[in-house]
Image (tube, rainbow, N blue to C red):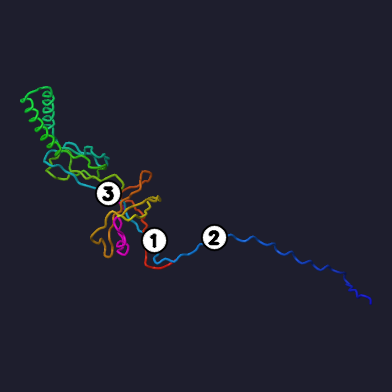
Amino acid sequence: LVPMLSVCAGGCQRTPASPDLPTERPATKVNVLRLERVEGTSRVAEFFGTLTPSRQRSLGFGKAGILETIASVGSRVPAGELLCELDQADLKNRQAEILQSLKSLERQLGNFAAQQRASNENQLREVNAQLESGRQMAPYDCVVADVLVDQGSVVGPRTPVIRIVETANPDVEINLPRSFADRMNVGDMVKATIDGENIDCEVQRKSIEEELPGSQLLWLRVTSSLDNIAWAFGQTVSVRFELMTDNAGY
């Protein structure tokens, strides 16, 4: 038998070789999370409040007199420093006389000297009490928000003459829907943001009456340091509340 040959008139062409199979790719690495069913899930809501002074007061004197000195608006006064005082020149002179008399009696002995010292000490206590009723010291670190009486004016007892606000960490005043406010308790911690900086706050108190129908006013005490944050009273603060719901989930 003679094998048959295939002849191409126009010349023979090579059959193309099979393409190379793709190389095997490495497996993609993944992280696996195991879901856990819970009976209650959390919900995050964001509301906006404003920075308000923690404390502010209007102050006056315990007696009538002429207003001699008063701190100017915008002055920062440390706790214990003088805010305002009546004209008390006569009392200050009397105080100096009594102190001088007590000094001269220090080295004297006998019943008469002891009686004189006791009398002078009683007088000094009375004068000091009168002086105290004619001056107002800062009850805490504060800034003078307003001066209500001009220097040199005659003022009556307990007449407000100056208004101060505390300069320590402020409060955040925020109005919340009742559905959120009812879930918040005094002492609860919440997160807030001032000028892009995260801070911690604590629910300080809740208003008894509704500001608007279906809402309640809350005051949050800022517990984080604000030394490196630019802030001012009236500034807007973003407050985030994470509340638990009754919805089951994973």
Q: Is residue 2 left or right of residue 46?
A: right
Q: Which mark is residue 31?
A: 2
Q: Callout 2: 10 Å neighbours few (<14), some, many (20+)? A: few
Distance from disc 3 to disc 2, alpha carbons, whole Å, reads 48 Å
Mark 1 residue type: Val
- Secondary structure beneath label 1: strand
* Callout 1 crowding tier (Cα within 10 Å): few <14, some 14–19, many ≥20: few
Residue 139: x %, y % from top left: 22, 42
Calculate the distance from the C-alpha at mark 3 to the C-alpha at mark 1.
27 Å
The extreme right residue here reads: 1
Quadrant in which residue 22 is drawn: bottom right
x, y percent for residue 37: 44, 66
Residue 44's disc is 1
Q: Which residue range is magenta in the image?
A: 171-186
1 or 2: mark nearer the eye: 2
Identify the disc placed on residue 54. Answer: 3
Q: CA distance from mark 1 to mark 2?
A: 26 Å
Q: Which mark is residue 222?
A: none
Which is nearer the N-term, disc 1 or disc 2? 2
Which sits in the foreground, 249 or 160?
249
The amino acid beneath tag 2 is Asn
Between label 3 and label 2, give the one nearer the viewer: 2
